[in-house]
């Protein structure tokens, strides 16, 4: 009997017992403008149904008996065995489903649901759905920080958001949410270091929760922290208010300390690692954000091993040069070294495969879990609010505001702004339009591309890195499916 493993098999198991520990492959803190993929419910194949193997289908061998099957820029990845591969081969040319072996019926139905088998006149790859349902807001509650990270884009000061400004910011976010008919709000409490103004974070989230209940919308909150000043009381408060936590960790020991130091120049690794242990011990699972530079790329495998050993969700992010970090030339990534360091980290992942999918976590600014047309939600469903209540498009250009919290509909001003970042759809980017990976990659960070090329409508300077590593990520996904679904 043909065997086909997908992520839903791991989540539900062969008996339908949902596993809440697996999570979603898109359960990450990317700021992509991901919309829900359009429902695809093909009619159940009958003997008279004609199907053909999708010409866009790609496979990567895993071992002598299994291979990963996927459609680039789609939302389905599966691990199939040799018998399932023979089913696909049978439909190498359009044919009806009559005369097939009796034990192939379920496999043909599953392969059709995955779009691996399609009607002869169907689209090979469908354009992703437009329109995210969640409005995302970055609340910059303070410019103060106890670290001086080498790649940080922010000029530090003691300026902090006041309760009055914060409340006005929440009101403005909800006004735009209602006017543009979003169904949920995601608040990212950031800085600086948001724990240095933590009482305001809690007050604002309590107020946002009241409004969310009043208007019947979803609410999600995440604190983006450097991890050095977290206290047990803060952890308890985050648990009580259902706030998630993301902590930055760039390496183990000296690798982290080479780029994330206290204001006095001392390294911060021991403080961060102690905080992570304390957070986990108190029942909160932090997500780990790892920023890769040329300084720490050789130790990336060690860092990933440390995170996997503690069963922590994580994301790998490439350093992006900015005006404040440009003097640190040794942060600049070199393509060959980066690919080598990433593959060393992938070997660690292969030896310690987590149950959770990593399709949205392993390759900076890409998301292989959900097809989408824009790398991030800048200019669409995203706003950044600074301590003074000014609202801009992107936290990396905090100084360029479009409006303020006093505006009746601040999101409308952001969408109409033609002088700031232009977040061009991937189908309009030179070098991307005909790329099979385009709806997973979407052409990279628009700000980074503009800094490197002076244009927003061209492919990312990291394009060749992405193309080199996509097959590695998909192979890891196939091995994960094989390991946990087979178990």
Image (cartoon, rainbow, N blue to C red):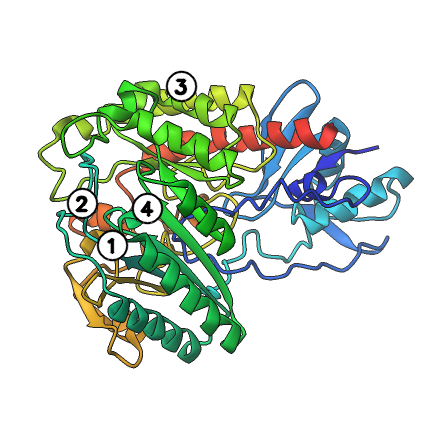
Marks 1 and 2, the one that precedes in the sequence: 2
For this view, does 486 lie left or right of residue 305?
Answer: right
Question: Along the polypeptide, which appears first: circle 4 or circle 3?
Answer: 3
**Figure check: 154 above or below 59:** below
Q: Circle 3 sits on which residue?
A: 302
How much space separates mark 4 and mark 3, taking CA atoms?
26 Å
- 4 vs 2, front mark: 2
Of labels 4 and 3, the one closer to you? 3
* The one of 267 and 392 positioned closer to us in this rendering: 267
Q: Which mark is residue 153?
A: 2
Labelled disc at residue 395: 1
How far is the residue under mark 4 from the one under mark 1? 17 Å
Q: In which quadrant is the N terminus drawn?
A: top right
Residue occupied by mark 4: 444
Mark 1 element type: helix
Quarter holding the C terminus is: top right
């Amino acid at each position: 009997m043909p065997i086909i493993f997908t992520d839903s098999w791991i989540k539900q198991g062969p008996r339908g017992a949902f596993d809440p520990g697996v999570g979603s492959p898109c359960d990450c803190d990317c700021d992509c403008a991901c919309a829900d993929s359009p429902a695809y419910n093909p009619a159940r194949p009958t003997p008279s149904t004609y199907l053909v193997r999708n010409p866009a289908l790609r496979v990567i061998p895993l071992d002598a008996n299994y291979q990963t099957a996927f459609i680039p820029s789609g939302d389905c990845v599966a691990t199939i065995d040799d018998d399932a591969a023979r089913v696909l081969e049978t439909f190498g040319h359009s044919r009806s489903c009559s005369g097939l072996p009796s034990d192939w019926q379920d496999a043909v139905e599953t392969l059709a649901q995955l779009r691996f088998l399609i009607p002869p006149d169907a689209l090979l790859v469908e354009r992703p759905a437009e329109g995210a349902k969640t409005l995302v807001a970055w609340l910059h509650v303070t410019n103060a920080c106890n670290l001086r990270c080498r790649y940080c884009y922010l000029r530090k000061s003691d300026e902090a958001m006041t309760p009055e400004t914060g409340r006005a910011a929440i009101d403005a976010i909800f006004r735009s949410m209602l006017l543009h008919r979003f169904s949920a709000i995601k608040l990212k409490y950031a800085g600086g270091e948001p724990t240095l103004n933590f009482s305001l974070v809690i007050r604002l989230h309590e107020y946002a929760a009241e409004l969310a209940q009043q208007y019947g919308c979803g609410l999600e909150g995440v604190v983006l922290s450097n991890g050095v000043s977290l206290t047990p009381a803060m952890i308890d408060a985050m648990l009580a208010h259902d706030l998630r936590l993301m902590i930055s960790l760039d390496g183990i020991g000296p690798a982290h300390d080479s780029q994330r130091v206290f204001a006095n120049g001392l390294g911060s690794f021991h403080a961060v690692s102690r905080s992570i242990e304390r957070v986990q011990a108190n029942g909160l699972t932090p997500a780990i954000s790892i920023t890769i530079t040329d300084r720490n790329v050789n130790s990336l495998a060690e860092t990933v091993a440390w995170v996997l050993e503690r069963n922590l969700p994580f994301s790998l992010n490439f350093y992006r040069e900015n005006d404040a970090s440009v003097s640190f030339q040794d942060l600049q990534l070199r393509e060959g070294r980066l690919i080598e360091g990433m593959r060393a980290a992938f070997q660690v992942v292969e030896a310690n495969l987590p149950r959770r999918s990593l399709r949205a976590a392993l390759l900076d600014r890409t998301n292989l879990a959900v097809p989408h047309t824009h790398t991030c939600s800048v200019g669409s469903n995203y706003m950044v609010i600074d301590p003074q209540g000014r609202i801009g498009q992107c936290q990396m250009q905090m100084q360029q505001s479009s409006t303020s919290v006093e505006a009746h509909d601040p999101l409308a001003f952001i969408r109409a702004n033609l002088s700031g970042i232009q977040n061009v759809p991937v189908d309009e980017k030179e070098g991307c339009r005909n790329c099979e990976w385009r709806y997973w990659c979407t052409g990279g960070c628009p700000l980074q591309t503009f800094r490197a090329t002076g244009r927003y409508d061209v492919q990312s300077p990291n394009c060749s890195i992405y193309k080199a590593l996509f097959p590695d990520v998909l192979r890891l996904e196939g091995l994960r499916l094989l390991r946990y679904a087979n178990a």
